[in-house]
């Protein structure tokens, strides 16, 4: 999506302002927002990539002015309603009133440590599928501009880079964000010279890499 | 959403709105049995007290003193780090990159906020900021200067944009003056930012309370 989230190389956001002795959370509601998002995700009704897609699929004005955890809450409310787990009236009133979809599972306190320690690895068995590219190969990124979730940033589109490593056969985020977690592709670290991306002002020896699934790439 | 009531009541009202909104959400989910409120407390406790940058600092300190571990860490970050008990969410696929005299590594997620939670905990606000995400790839030396780090042009700068589930841990160079220190003594030298790449590891002189 050519959306507000894709900001690598954009101008106008000013200097970085690291906060001295920054607290882990800036308000009590932020920690609840983190926890309720993880706990609701553990019901298993949507993938983490669907969450990411809902967070970024917003008007630029809203995306750039909402705080990080506010975007999480907006997205969580959207997903809960979309999947029939709550109704908007219930969120507005702050109480459960209607029969709604039952959860596939509920994360219990006693299972939190194990669930977080296990995570959700995205490596899959490639079977007979061999990687098309090898370290050292030159590749060009395709000029892909889907309206949906993708992980090929605009600033590397149509650029020639070099395969540095094959990272594994990973669930394809573009498909997972649309609800299909069965699609996987080979994943590569692709390195670009800074000058290729940013022109003559870049320091010639600097490089930038992205992790790109095979459908993003074509041979040069 | 019909529930968007984030209108401005004046200074300070934003947080109040969000407090009310999240409480309402949590209440509805708990009443429906979709969440266990005690599970939320356990999640918060995990990231407040158990999973944070001290995990990554112990990985780095061990790599500084244990060449066999450093070799394993370079070859298979997920396995080497997992052997120290650091596994799980947002750290399922890890790769460690080592700073040297020739190369300095910097990690960003331009599309959102991907970050190695299992070794660094939750990311700081600046890492998630639009300013950092926008410029870390196009003006990384300018970013580093804002953190007080001025790299010579002779040092190659490598920026890692975390666009997949791969998560990157920077292993900063071991500072001079800490020869002979054991792992636990080295850990305080390894700051969170040094493992993102916006700073160097602390020098022993910079430690407020140097070990004996």
Image (cartoon, coloured by chain):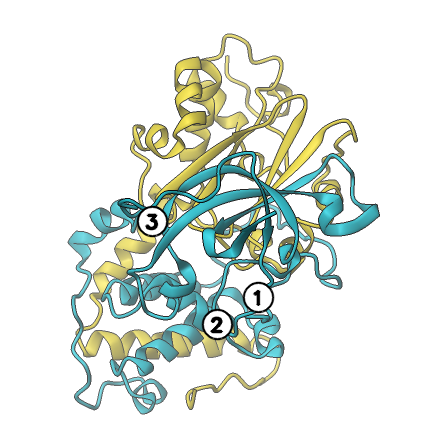
Q: Nearer the viewer, mark 3 or mark 2?
A: 2
Q: CA distance from mark 3 to mark 2?
A: 25 Å
Q: Chain of mark 1?
A: A
* Left or right of residue B188, residue B69 in this image: left
Is disc 3 in contact with disc 2, using a CB cutoff of under 8 Å? no
| Residue at 50% over, 12% down | B212
User: Can you name the residue that lies furthest to the front here?
Assistant: A220
Label disc, if present, on residue B89 of the rendered structure:
3
| Above or below, comparing residue A183 to residue A186 in the picture | below
Where residue B167 appears, as percent x and y from the top left, is 45, 43
| Residue at 62% over, 78% down | A61
Chain A is shown in which shade?
cyan
Q: Nearer the viewer, mark 2 or mark 1?
A: 2
Find residue B56 and report its image quarter.
Answer: top left
Label disc, if present, on residue A56 of the rendered structure:
none
Label disc, if present, on residue A148 of the rendered structure:
2
Q: Chain of mark 2?
A: A
Label 2 element class: loop
Q: Earlier in the sequence, mark 2 or mark 1?
A: 1
Considering depth in this image, is B141 or B32 the residue closer to the camera? B141
Mark 1, residue position: A5
* Left or right of residue B92, residue A65 in this image: right
Q: CA distance from mark 2 to mark 1?
A: 12 Å
* Left or right of residue A3, residue A40 in this image: left
Is disc 2 in contact with disc 1, using a CB cutoff of under 8 Å? no
Q: Chain of mark 3?
A: B
- Circle 1 crowding by C-alpha within 10 Å: few under 14, some 14–19, many from 20: many
| Residue at 74% over, 34% down | A205
* Left or right of residue A207, residue B20 in this image: left
């Amino acid at each position: 999506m050519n959306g507000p989230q894709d900001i690598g190389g954009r101008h106008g956001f000013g200097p970085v302002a690291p906060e001295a002795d920054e607290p882990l959370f800036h308000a009590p509601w932020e920690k609840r927002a983190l926890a309720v998002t993880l706990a609701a995700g553990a019901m298993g009704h949507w993938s983490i990539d669907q969450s990411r897609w809902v967070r970024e699929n917003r008007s630029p004005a809203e995306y750039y002015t909402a705080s990080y955890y506010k975007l999480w809450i907006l997205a969580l409310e959207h997903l809960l309603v979309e999947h029939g787990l709550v109704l908007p009236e219930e969120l507005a009133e702050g109480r459960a009133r209607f029969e709604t979809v039952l959860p596939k599972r509920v994360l219990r306190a006693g299972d939190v440590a194990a669930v977080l320690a296990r995570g959700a690895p995205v490596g899959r068995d490639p079977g007979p599928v061999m990687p098309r590219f090898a370290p050292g190969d030159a590749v060009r990124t395709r000029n892909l501009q889907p309206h949906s979730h993708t992980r090929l940033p605009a600033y590397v589109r149509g650029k020639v880079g070099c395969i540095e490593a094959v990272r594994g056969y990973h669930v394809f985020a573009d498909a997972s964000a649309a609800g299909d977690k069965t699609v996987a592709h080979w994943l590569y670290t692709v390195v670009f010279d800074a000058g290729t991306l940013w022109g003559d002002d870049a320091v010639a020896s600097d490089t930038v890499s992205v992790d790109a699934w095979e459908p993003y790439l074509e041979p040069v | 959403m019909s529930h968007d009531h984030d209108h401005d009541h004046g200074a300070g009202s934003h947080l109040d709105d969000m407090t009310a909104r999240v409480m309402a959400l949590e209440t509805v989910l708990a009443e429906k049995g979709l969440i266990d409120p005690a599970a939320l407390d356990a999640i918060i406790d995990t990231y407040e007290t158990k999973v944070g940058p001290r995990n990554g600092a112990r990985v780095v300190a061990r790599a500084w003193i244990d060449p066999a571990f450093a070799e394993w860490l370079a070859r298979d970050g997920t396995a080497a780090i997992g052997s120290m008990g650091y596994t799980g969410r947002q750290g399922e696929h890890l790769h460690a990159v080592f700073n040297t005299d020739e190369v300095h590594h910097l990690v960003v997620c331009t599309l959102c906020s991907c970050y190695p939670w299992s070794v660094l905990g939750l990311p700081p606000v600046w890492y998630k900021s639009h300013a950092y995400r926008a410029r870390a790839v196009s003006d990384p030396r300018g970013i580093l200067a804002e953190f007080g780090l001025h790299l010579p042009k002779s040092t190659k700068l490598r920026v890692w944009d975390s666009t997949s589930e791969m998560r990157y841990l920077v292993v900063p160079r071991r500072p001079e003056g800490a020869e002979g220190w054991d792992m636990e003594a080295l850990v305080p030298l390894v700051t969170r930012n040094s493992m993102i790449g916006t700073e160097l590891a602390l020098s022993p002189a910079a430690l407020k309370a140097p070990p004996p």
